Structure formats: C-alpha cells, structure tokens
Amino acid sequence: MVHTLEEIQRLLKSDGCLIDIQPLIEAPLLKVYQRDPEVFVEPDPSYDYEEDLRQADAALTQVFRRGLFVIEERSKFDFLTHGSSAQELLAFWGKTRADDNNTEEDSAEQHIKQVYNRIEEIRQAAGPEAEIALHERARVIRLAPNLRKEELT
Amino acid sequence: MTVRVDPENNETRALLDLVDFTGKHVLEIGCGDGRLTWRYAVWAEHVTAIDPKADAISRAKENLPDELKSRVEFHQFTFEEFSAASEPSSFDTVIFSWSF
C-alpha cells in the first residue's frame, strides 16, 4: 500500500491531486425498509475486511509522516446498495462463492447465508413492497503531493 | 428490481464537491465495471481506468456510453503493471476508490 501511494505520487503532476475513497472502519448495516421507514437493521455478517482497512489507514499515516502527501479536504457519505431481496444483494457483491453445491463451504460462509436468509424472511414478512439495502459509511479525502516532492525523490 | 448501487448519488456528490474534473487527465485505480467512471467522465478531458478483474473490465467496455468513447479507456491491469509502464507526472487527478 505504501509503495502504491509512492507510485501514485510519481504519476501525479505537481499541482494534481489524489482522491482516496474508502469505507469507514465499521461494519456495514443490512436494512429492511418499507418505503422510507426502516423496519429492521443488522450488521452485515460478511464484514471481514476491518484489518485491511486498518492497514490502509496505517499506510496513509506513514506517507503523511514522510511528507509525500498533504490532506486538503475530506468528507463522509452514506453509500447504499438497494436490492429486492437479501439473496440478490448477496450475489451482487459476491460475498459468498457462487457454487451453491460446494460441499466444502466453511462455517463463516454458512453463517453469512443463514443471516441473509433470516433477513430475507423479515423482508418478506414486512410486506410486498419491502426492500433491502446494504448501508456503508465511507470517506473521501483529497490529497495533494507535497511541495517537497522533488527533495524526497 | 435489479440491484441499484448508490442511486442517491451520495458518492458522486462527495466526489464532485472535492474535484473539478474540467479538462483534467484522470487515472482511476480499481474502476470495476465503470460504475463511478460514468458519473464524472463527462467533464474530464481523458480518463484512463484500470482494474485487474477481466470480467469487470469487459462489462465496463460493453457498457461504455457512445458519448464517452473518445475520452474514456478501460484496461485490465494491476496498478503495479500500469505504473511500471507509465511516465511520471502524467495525471492531474488519480482516483483510488474502494481499493484498500
């Protein structure tokens, strides 16, 4: 990751910018909703990349300390993926292997499918117009190559 | 209903609040199927969008709107491959999106 950021700095013009968009370090939420009101909310059981996000943040911190980039602006936003069923969302994001006949399915994957199945039951019970959404929080940062670029390379 | 990703355009708004793409040469790393690319490319001078996943790049090329064909190119590359073959100071903006 640090090497990637070093290379991005090399490819950028001195007055250019890097836009880094990443999810926040928190579990996404699965939400069942009927028009606007939410009728059920549960953390996404397939959230297994917290350590990856922490490592990415650590890499950013490292390049700040080395003076490769400076933060110019940042903001947060809500990122929602809507589906008509839990299984549709599950398949779309590829959170489990596509082959349902896989006999070597691990327990984590079984747990994910069980939770999604349960949420689908809740969605169906909530009424014919009930939908489901995966709600992630994300942040976007604009970074500028530090003016000391030439000194460091 | 098919799956709808960010129909509220929250990500696009957050992006456009931070960057003016007018006339810019843009590199997008981890473009996937071009979901985000379509939403800002209309303003850019040129967009190079890369992703290591062949199926995603195929979908991006298939779905590339005609009006963007002259200014957007998709390539199946890892960033390491792309970077090794690229000249320094080539881009005004680099988007590193959901690629932790």
Image: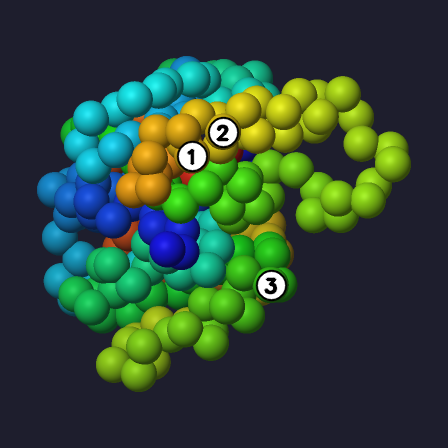
- Disc 2 marks a residue whose amino acid type is Glu
Point out residue A147 in the picture as x, y percentages from the top left corner: 25, 35
- Disc 1 marks a residue whose amino acid type is Gln
- Disc 3 marks a residue whose amino acid type is Asp
Q: In which quarter of the image is residue B65?
A: bottom left
Q: B40 or A17: which is nearer to us?
A: B40
Identify the residue at horizontal 34%, vertical 29% (top origin): A126
Q: Is residue B53 left or right of residue A145?
A: right
Point out residue A61 in the picture as x, y percentages from the top left corner: 41, 18
Cβ atoms under marks 2 and 1 closer than 8 Å: yes
Query: Residue A124's mark?
Result: 1
Q: Name the residue under label 3.
A: B55
Query: Residue A121's mark?
Result: 2
Judged from the image, the secondary structure of the residue bearing numbered disc 1 is helix
Judged from the image, the secondary structure of the residue bearing numbered disc 2 is helix
Q: A147 or A135: which is nearer to us?
A: A135
